[in-house]
Image (cartoon, coloured by chain):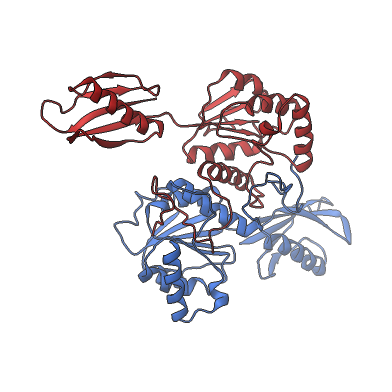
Chain colours: A red, B blue
Amino acid sequence: TAAVARVSRGPAELLGRALFVRPDGSYEGGLGGRPERDRTAADEAGALLAEGRTGAFTLPEDPDLTVFVESSVPPPRMIVFGAVDFAAALARTGKFLGYHVTVCDARPVFATRLRFPEADEIVVDWPHRYLRQTETDARTVLCVLTHDAKFDVPLLEEALRLPVAFVGAMGSRRTHEDRTRRLREVGLTDRELARLRSPIGLDLGARTPEETALSIAAEIVAARRGGTGVPLTGSGTPIHREEGAGAHAAA
Amino acid sequence: TAAVARVSRGPAELLGRALFVRPDGSYEGGLGGRPERDRTAADEAGALLAEGRTGAFTLPEDPDLTVFVESSVPPPRMIVFGAVDFAAALARTGKFLGYHVTVCDARPVFATRLRFPEADEIVVDWPHRYLRQTETDARTVLCVLTHDAKFDVPLLEEALRLPVAFVGAMGSRRTHEDRTRRLREVGLTDRELARLRSPIGLDLGARTPEETALSIAAEIVAARRGGTGVPLTGSGTPIHREEGAGAHAAA
């Protein structure tokens, strides 16, 4: 993750000069002016980088100078725990939404490339052990499809304490209640438990693996974008919100 | 659309004998017994065919005879009107859900194979004219993304009078109100207008074309399966309902 901020318009001797900006705000290079200007430009570029955006800005003190920023941000991660039948459809939907998709299962006969041709990565490991050592961030979504307390409880114990975007787990009401009880027993707080989306997904009445995957992906989008899941018919809310334009209608 | 019903268990001399059954109940061939038995078997096979299902049955009078039925039903149609940017993502999601996807637009520069590599069919024609002459059925979904009264009004006038599964149209609240007024002017009744899903999609707060496509596909599934779209968290409703088993939990 880094951004390159380059002078794209301005005096000939400055054109093409660039800063290399890191997420922590540090930078290298220079735009050929005072160091304070580089610091201000690095801050502007850092703000775009934090949102994963590419764009341009001008500095208040130098209105003739345009700086173009290219942010390079790796795709967010979706980790699907449980190489169950649904998981292949979910991996496909995750790819469709732009996620880097990992499928993790402790059982080597299920976690195979043949069953998950569209996953970016297939990991044979105990879910909680894998989650403990892999990198996640505030955009990561964790989908727990294992349905088995032996895997779910140690996994969710880790997952619900990580600052990730989304933690969901599949299961019936009974599974959910049993799981919640076991998670309390291992010491999870109400606040930690409140982060768990369970049963995972929106109520679409899904029957097929594809419909189920869609209901999970729809919940992930709604959680990320602040949607409710109810039909837009009659609501007046536009289906498509322009990036940065708030509730702006597409038509 | 047809079913083949074949004796899969029973006396050696009957094994493999078959009926070819059409949706109207007519049939050819025979299972090698009395004509009444063929009639009963054709009825049973027709019932499976009507649901697009493959399965087996035994006849009450012949418990030793098992008849296996293979239904061959073409995939349902999704017709996307308007070769807009969203449409490619929607075509992909439609394919994912098993639809035969057609993209229709009057503008040849937009309705191209290059822009819609995953559509089954690309049609350059006026939407309402195309809809009038193409075959639809009770499983067909119509998605109107054109955003232009010139195309939308004559198209929706046709669409809302067809016995299809789903008619949705994109647009802001203002577009929707203007469109509703024009549709009333051309004579659509309240009951016909009530079938229109507009703005199309569930409220996921969608921003990207992929998220928008997902919100439309999710509404189509919810409409088909009777889902509400709200998160399953806390609702106790299982995300996955087994075919034919009602609200049966997956775990």
Q: Quadrant of residue A84?
A: top right
Question: Relative to residue A190, is residue B201 depicted above or below?
Answer: below
- Rendering coords of residue A24 (x, y %): 40, 21
The relative height of residue B132 versus residue A62 in the rendered view (above or below) is below
In this view, the residue farthest toward the left is: A12
Q: Position of residue A116 (x, y in %)?
A: 57, 32
Asked if residue B28 can be seen in this view, the reply is yes
Q: In which quarter of the image is the C terminus of chain B?
A: top right
Which one is nearer the viewer's eye here, B109 or A220?
A220
The residue sitting at 55% across, 36% down in the picture is A91
- Point out residue A201 in the picture as x, y percentages from the top left corner: 63, 44
Image point (53%, 75%), residue name:
B161
Q: Is residue A39 left or right of residue A155?
A: left
A170, above or below B147, in the image = above
Give the image quarter of residue B173. Answer: bottom left
Nearest the viewer among A33 and B54 is A33
| Residue drawn at the location 15% of the way across and 26% of the way down | A14
Q: Quadrant of the N terminus of chain B?
A: bottom right
Q: In the rendered image, is residue A108 in sight?
A: no
The location of residue A110, given as percent across then percent down, is: 65, 28
